[in-house]
Image: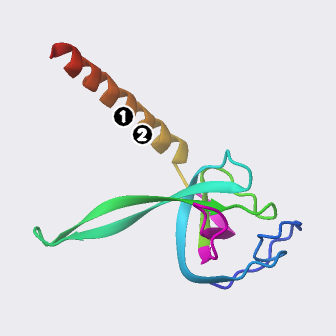
Amino acid sequence: MAAEAPKNKCSDTKCPYHGRLSVRGRHFTGIVISGRMRKTAVIEFERLHFLKKYERYEKRRTKMKVHNPDCINAKEGDLVGVVECRPLSKTKNFVIIRKLGVEKGFKGKMEAREASKIEAKKLESENQEAV
């Protein structure tokens, strides 16, 4: 995945543009759902999974931790391109190489997801009280 170097400079050794990190292998496009960790972001993307029994596809979500160099500095809600690299830590094997834009309606989706989690917990606690 060829991408132009960002205009900002950084001194990160794990940056594919300004450091010594080589990239190879798989590449994905995803949405940054968390950027609270230092130099790390959590991205999420949807994929299709085939169900042989029903001869149909279902949507599944995949989350992964990726390295977020200072020169790119992706925030929550950004649409980013990531590419595989050598293992950078126990859970990071990908690095962000470019920002593609901002996801429309990101905050609404996240609020709806949180609300559904709260409702599920309430139903679970009510079921436990009934038993």
Amino acid type at mark 1: Ser
As helix, strand or loop, the secondary structure at mark 2 comes to helix
The residue labelled by disc 1 is 116
Q: Is residue 86 magenta?
A: yes
Depicted 62 relative to depicted 105: above or below = below
Outermost top residue: 129
The residue labelled by disc 2 is 113
Q: Is residue 32 magenta?
A: no
Q: Is residue 107 left or right of residue 46?
A: right
The residue lying toward the viewer, choosing from 34 and 77, is 34
Tell me the magenta residue range: 83-102
- Please, which colouring scheme is shown? rainbow
Distance Cα–Cα, label 1 vs label 2: 5 Å
The residue lying toward the viewer, choosing from 30 and 24, is 24
Q: Write down the quadrant of residue 52 in the picture.
A: bottom left
Q: Write down the quadrant of residue 78 in the picture.
A: bottom right
Q: Residues within 10 Å of mark 2 (few under 14, many from 20)?
A: few
**Numbered circles on residues, count:** 2
